[in-house]
């Protein structure tokens, strides 16, 4: 199973968190087992797609029984690396950085924010959820000394790569990037982008497409 | 060209905002023209992919000359529906809602936030960037009376569909959804999701994959 995990396609990676979200919902509703057909109706992927996806990871279903919601949920959690905790810092504590800090704090599933960094002297020294905002110059040592796993980058476009270079040198494993820029990192550093402006532009594209369709009717 | 627009694949829609981002960067650097090969090196898609994508929309390049950065940028802006303004409201003015409100305000490219809504009496009556937070009960009339185009949903999972139903009834055209749930809407309402938790889980998956690869070495 190990070697499979490292080779799954980008498309499956995108679907797994969605499976997890629905299974978590089912668990909360007290549902014990579910067939791929029922999952299909819920999630919107075809039943054969679902069986194929879950087979990639070893297949947890039993013919004629379906999937145990609880064990499938925990298996997917493991595959997603959610069976451990991640020491996390946030870099750039402006509006978005503060919101993401709070979001991650309240979300509480293993992404523990243990450090906050900014260059703004008005922010340095403040605390958010009992975590101190430190000066950016202390970040590199902090990452090394505390074995930080993940950095959440909420700085502006101009500074994102510079911040990234320092993080990579300090041994960061993963970056959750909110800066509207694509970062250069070595292969062994994971980057997941949340490009908010790209997402907003996708929305305006879809609205325009609907309007053009209406106009053609 | 009209009918093409309404049928482009989901994959191209995802790439267009990225083209726009890089072209905007080039414009700021004063670059006047660029070949598909140069764009390829910058963006990471193959040159033939780029030519094919841009051809879908009518093709703006000239053989042997390449693309005019400025006119390609403006064409893509038009295709993305960014040649107009959108009247936008935000629903749910907690931490994330406030951050997204500020983000969209400072971003300033045609997504004008004209209304904010919440159920929390501590928030109703406050202002953010001179826009008043109103009670949720006023939202439906506000959307109708002001011809609101887009709603940004920052409420919790439990309330997101209820909010959506009210917005759809009031005639909303597009929803930028930050609630960790998939919304049911009619076909003529555009929805773009920012599922932050899915994104974070993708990151942990990638980190775990890297660690497994390391362990195998």
Image (cartoon, coloured by chain):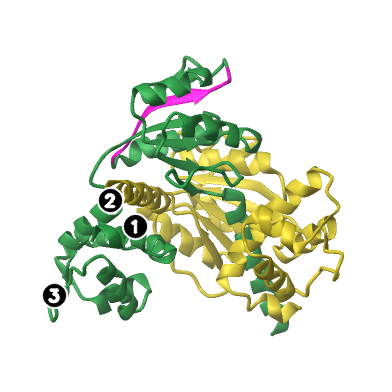
Chain colours: A green, B yellow
- Check residue A6 in the rendering and tell me which mark sits there, or answer none: 1
What span is colored magenta in the figure?
A110-120
**Nearer the observer, B173 or B145:** B173
The residue positioned 71% from the left and 63% from the top of the image is B81
Q: Is residue A67 left or right of residue A23?
A: left
Q: SS for tag 1?
A: loop
Classify the position of the N terminus of chain B by image quarter: bottom right
Q: Find residue B44 and report its image quarter.
A: bottom right
The verdict on a common chain for dots 2 and 1 is no
**Nearer the observer, A13 or B182:** A13
- Check residue A62 in the rendering and tell me which mark sits there, or answer none: 3
Discs 1/3, front: 1
> Does residue B9 show up magenta in the picture?
no
Residue B19 x %, y %? 68, 58
The residue positioned 85% from the left and 71% from the top of the image is B63
The residue positioned 56% from the left and 64% from the top of the image is B170
Q: Specify the subunit that label 2 lies on.
A: B
Q: Is residue B129 above or below residue B196?
A: above
Residue B72 x %, y %? 80, 61
Whether residue B173 can be seen here:
no
Q: Is residue A178 above or below residue A122?
A: below
Q: Are marks 2 and 1 in contact (CB under 8 Å)?
A: yes
Q: Is residue B39 left or right of residue A185?
A: right
Characterize the magenta stretch by its predominant secondary structure.
Answer: strand
Residue B121 x %, y %? 45, 37
Q: Specify the subunit that label 1 lies on.
A: A
Residue that carries the numbered disc 2 in the rendered image: B216
């Amino acid at each position: 199973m190990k070697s499979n995990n490292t080779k799954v396609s980008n498309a499956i990676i995108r679907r797994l968190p969605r499976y997890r979200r629905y299974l978590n919902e089912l668990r909360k509703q007290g549902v014990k087992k579910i067939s791929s057909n029922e999952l299909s109706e819920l999630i919107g992927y075809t039943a054969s797609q679902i069986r194929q996806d879950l087979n990639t990871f070893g297949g947890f279903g039993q013919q004629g029984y379906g999937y145990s919601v609880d064990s499938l949920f925990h298996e997917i959690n493991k595959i997603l690396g959610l069976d451990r905790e991640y020491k996390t810092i946030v870099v750039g504590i402006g509006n978005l950085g503060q919101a993401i800090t709070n979001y991650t704090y309240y979300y509480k599933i293993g992404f523990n924010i243990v450090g906050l960094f900014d260059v703004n002297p008005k922010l340095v020294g403040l605390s958010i959820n009992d975590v101190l905002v430190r000066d950016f110059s202390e970040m590199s040592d902090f990452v090394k000394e505390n074995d930080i796993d993940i950095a959440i980058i909420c700085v502006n476009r101009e500074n994102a790569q510079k911040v990234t270079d320092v993080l990579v040198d300090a041994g960061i494993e993963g970056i959750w990037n909110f800066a509207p820029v694509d970062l250069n990192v070595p292969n062994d550093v994971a980057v997941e982008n949340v490009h908010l402006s790209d997402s907003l532009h996708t929305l305006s594209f879809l609205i325009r497409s609907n309007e053009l369709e209406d106009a053609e009717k």
